[in-house]
Image (tube, rainbow, N blue to C red):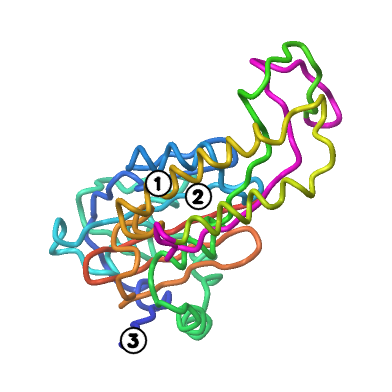
Amino acid sequence: MSEIRVLGSRALRDKDFEHVTLPEPWMSASGREFVHQDPDVEAFRRTVPIYCGDFDLTVTCLERKNARDVGFERFVANCLRDQLHGHGGADPEDASTRFHFRAAYDLQQLAGMVVEEEAAAYVASLPYGAPIEVLWDFSNFGCLRWDWLETSVRLQGRPVPGTGGVHAPAVDGSEFLPRIFSHAEPDVMHQDVHAIREHALGQLKYLPDLREGLPRDAMAKLINEDILALSALCHRHGTFGEAVLPGAFDPITGFFLKARDGNSRQAFIETGEYFYEVLVSTS
């Protein structure tokens, strides 16, 4: 793997940058929704949600051939400035003009950024040195979970568990079930999906009796349907990671790690074809 250029805040703080119009996020997600540029990926992850607690995820991809005059530092500076403005920061008088980064960004946040040595150690730890690994690490994206069954039975009005111990009537026969977990690495291919299916189905026999007599084969049917969708994604794109992110396994050539603590993980990534921002916040 070639040497990766790791940036720190010093690469930004005393420079002027031209404004860049950033694309709409490639994907965004929370504990309640998932939006993706590929409708098939979106449909899969809405059925099999990301398991990351109460979180917000945003991934931005800028294809470099469509922005040939934009360098990595300029991309990072614009993303950070836009993020600050989106959270109540100062709005530049004219977004089309140059801006001084130190003046446009909060100095206290600058002081709290991850130092280059920590960022270099992190990116060096990635086996492939690829953007998709950052997404998987930050968001637990590979975790697959099944914890409720929607269409197997019609038990209208039967109580189902709700939040805070409160029970609510079932709607269209929904029943909450014990959670079943499996995992898909970013390099999972079509021929690997069978093992994921067997791992998930194998957990059914360890579940206690399903409440209200829900049959286990109904849960197995749901898992099989979702695994077929995952298999189709891998078959079409090569791997699960390539279905999720363009240029997923392209080697990282530039890296800027803004935060990587318990509640905030934010990284900027450069490859030969793309600039990326991966932002995950949890509570």
Reading the image, the residue beneath label 3 is 1
Which quarter of the rendering shows the N terminus? bottom left
* SS type, badge 3: loop
Q: Is residue 120 above or below residue 86?
A: below
Q: Amino acid at mark 1?
A: Met
In the image, what residue occupies the spot 41% across and 77% down?
A: 128
Q: Position of residue 100 (x, y in %)?
A: 31, 63
- The answer to whether marks 2 and 1 mark residues whose Cβ atoms lie closer than 8 Å is yes
In the image, what residue occupies the spot 50% across and 86% down?
A: 117
Q: Position of residue 270 (x, y in %)?
A: 31, 70
In the image, what residue occupies the spot 33% across and 88% down?
A: 3
Seen from the viewer's position, the closer of residues 46 and 269 is 46
Q: Is residue 167 magenta?
A: yes
Reading the image, the residue beneath label 1 is 27
Q: Amino acid at mark 3?
A: Met
Foreground mark, 3 or 2, reads 3
In the image, what residue occupies the spot 78% across and 19% down?
A: 168
In the picture, the disc for residue 57 is 2
Lateral position of residue 258 relative to residue 270, left or right: right
Q: For residue 178, what is the image quadrant?
A: top right
Q: Pick whichever of labels 1 and 3 is earlier in the sequence.
A: 3
Seen from the viewer's position, the closer of residues 184 and 262 is 184
Q: Position of residue 229 (x, y in %)?
A: 43, 42
